[in-house]
Amino acid sequence: MRKVLIAVCVAGFFFALFGTDSRVLTMGRYDAFFMDDISIFRNPANVSIYPNMLMGSLGIYKEDDELDAKAGYSPSSGDTLYSYPRYNRDPQKPYFGGILSYSLNQSADAGDQYPMLSVGMILNRYDEMLDYITPGSNKFVGLEDEAIYSPITYESPVGKFDFIVGVALKNGAMIGGGAYVAFQKIKIDEDVEKETRLIRGNGGINWPVGKTMDLEVSVNGGVLTKVGKDTNNTLVTVADNDIFVASDLRLFSALSSLNGDFVPHLGFKLIKFNSDVNRIFSFNAGFAVNVNIDRGFFWAGCEGFYEDNSAQRSEGYSSVDKMGGRISFGLERNIIWDWFVWRIGGTKVLGFQKVGKGSEATTKWFENPEADASDEDHIATGWGLNIENRFKVDCVLSEDIFYTFTNLISGNHHHITARITATYSF
């Protein structure tokens, strides 16, 4: 009996390793205060920190009624749902790509590669700015496609390319630039029927401002376009080359007493839709402490935020003001073996929002979802593999996994994990 139980546990943990974008989501769901390879998409200067690396994700696997229903249809039985409680479908939004680096100091010792040039290309990554022009997203600023009287249909973008170039200087300073494009346009003759487009450019630095301090500054900007059509053949314009700009600043200051860093952070974002009146402005500021612990890493921080949103028209209101704070933490540690990493993190958002203007405005408190298996809820946990610090596989576990015992001996569990990401340094 004991051998059977051990086999069940090992099998459950093995399958759990193959299942979301992963380290950030399991380390507090927020990467503003610690370094991770995903930071290259915000600050392209950081591409020099990850030279000669391949990266990718199998995609996001989570509960989705529409996709699950499609996975259960049987063409031979007149599109009738299977009666089986389990089914398979592909995860959504996978991506892959790589970074190639070339030392410009070929005559130096092997340990001194600077100055160094790095070039990266990532294919099919879903950029967070697409949320503002994607129906169904909680950030979408247009009318939903299920409008009762005259449904509106939109087109999803194709392409989704990241291009990144970075240079590391002799003194350790890093500069970089990048671009992202996603697009779609449907035309009949010369008339535009539907269009979706995101063009984003960014630049940044990672600069040593002292023996124990590194300053990061990045600036992002671009244009958004979203045009749909309702059942009356009327064009509906959500965005038409509307401009957005964002910036982030953070400082890593070493604290020898804690064997870590003190990290303050500032960020803002401004998006304009169709006019100066329809806009989104957000600002956030906070600080955190990063601590290197025995065989692991811990961080904790807090942040305040403010958002003025006058562009959300899908709910029929004119404006939303939000103000609040976020407390987050993350912990990772090698357990049992050096190649096996355990992670857990959490975040709590509490704020106050005002919807509408003048005497008709309503106010209420809000918080992030408590437990809905989304990327924004309170707690996440996950596993990681680290083979010789070169090949790394990270995943996010479903939050009920320890209650359903990996579905091997109890219940009909929807999925064990939500995403797998991996990197390989060569």
Image: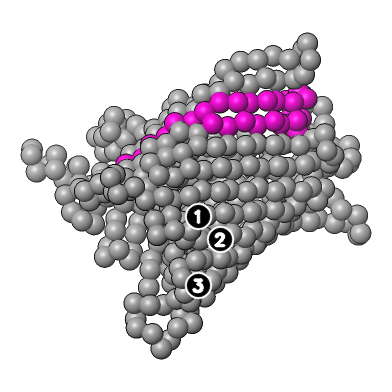
Residue type beneath disc 2: Ile
**Residue drawn 37% across and 47% down?**
261
Quarter of the picture containing the C terminus is: bottom left
Say whether residue 318 is magenta: yes
Is the Cβ of the residue at disc 2 closer than 8 Å to that at disc 1?
Answer: yes
Q: Is residue 294 above or below residue 398?
A: below
Residue at 85% x, 39% y is: 275
Residue at the farthest top position: 359
Q: Where does residue 205 sit, x and y in percent of width and height? A: 56, 60
Residue type, mark 1 in image: Leu
Which residue was labeled with disc 3?
A: 169
Q: Nearer the viewer, residue 405 or 17?
A: 17
* Cα separation between marks 1 and 3: 15 Å
* Residue linked to disc 1: 215
Left or right: 329 in relation to 59: left
Looking at the rendering, the stretch of residues picked out in magenta corresponds to: 304-333
Q: Is residue 397 visible?
A: no
What residue does disc 2 label?
Answer: 205
In the image, residue 111 sits, relative to residue 245, either above or below, namely: below
Mark 2 lies on a secondary structure that is strand
Calculate the distance from the C-alpha at mark 2 to the C-alpha at mark 3.
11 Å
Image spot of residue 236 (x, y percent): 84, 40
Q: Label 3 is placed on what type of residue?
A: Leu
x then y, percent, for residue 138: 63, 34
Q: Badges 1 and 3: C-beta atoms under 8 Å apart?
A: no
